[in-house]
Image: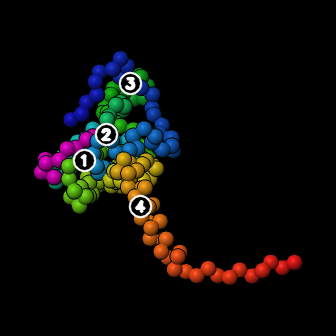
Amino acid sequence: MINPSPRKFKKVNKKLIRKTYENKSNKLKFGTHGIQALAKGFLTVQQIEAVRRTITGKLKRKVKVWIRAYPDFPRTAKPKEVRMGRGKGAVDHWVCCIKPGRILFEIGGVDKATADAALRLAKYKLPVRTKIVSKEEVDAALGVVTKAAHTKAPKAVKEEAKAEAPKAAAKPAAAKPAPKK
């Protein structure tokens, strides 16, 4: 189980997740396939562990799994049948705040079909809406030009120009009517 390191103040104010999108953790940094959140919410330690066990079990521990969601926010609760007042309750569990667009889990070293099968099973364990993404999809959506795409682009442009040149020469030029005065 994932537990955060000790902190100076255990209890914090209640956190509200605004309707903004994730700006920092919205790209695949380590693996080739991942799970991206589409809605806001909270992930508990138990949910993160369930997803990790599902992915590693499905892929027979032959791939690398990166957990990008870290539970660093404490949730407090008072015991049952306790009257109101007398301060805030003790820390009950830890959660991770999720914004839309955040990459939650990444895997690498496996083909697309196998990755999709494992991540589809893992999606059902999460309390927020998610989608399965690959590195190419995320880079294309964000407008990131990869090195491979950058080197292929000039060749593709040259090939298109070569293909269009014979077509343009084969077509006779249409006679333009004389301008009226």
Circles 3 and 1: CB distance less than 8 Å?
Answer: no
Task: Measure how far apart labels 2 and 1 are at the Cα level.
Answer: 11 Å
Mark 1 Cα shell of 10 Å, populated few (<14), some (14-19), many (≥20): many
Identify the element where label 1 is drawn.
strand
Q: In the image, 93: left or right of 83?
A: left
Task: Measure how far apart labels 1 and 4 are at the Cα level.
Answer: 31 Å
Which residue is denoted by mark 3 in the rendering?
11
In percent of the image, x 40 and y 50: which residue is there? 150
Which residue is more in the foreground, 24 or 149? 149
Compared with 115, 86 (above or below) is: above
In percent of the image, x 17 and y 47: which residue is there? 63
In percent of the image, x 42 and y 56: which residue is there? 153
Which residue is denoted by mark 1 in the rendering?
107
Magenta highlight on residue 60: yes
Which residue is denoted by mark 2 in the rendering?
68
Q: Amino acid at mark 2?
A: Arg
Q: In the image, 40: left or right of 52?
A: right
Magenta span of residues: 59-68
Mark in front: 3 vs 4:
4
Residue 155 visible within the image: yes
Q: In the image, 60: left or right of 171?
A: left
Identify the element where label 3 is drawn.
loop
Indicate the position of residue 148 as horizontal and vertical percent values. 35, 51
Residue 156 is labelled as: 4
Q: Amino acid at mark 4?
A: Ala
Mark in front: 1 vs 4:
4
Identify the element where label 4 is drawn.
helix
Compared with 47, 165 (above or below) is: below
Indicate the position of residue 132 as horizontal and vertical percent values. 33, 55
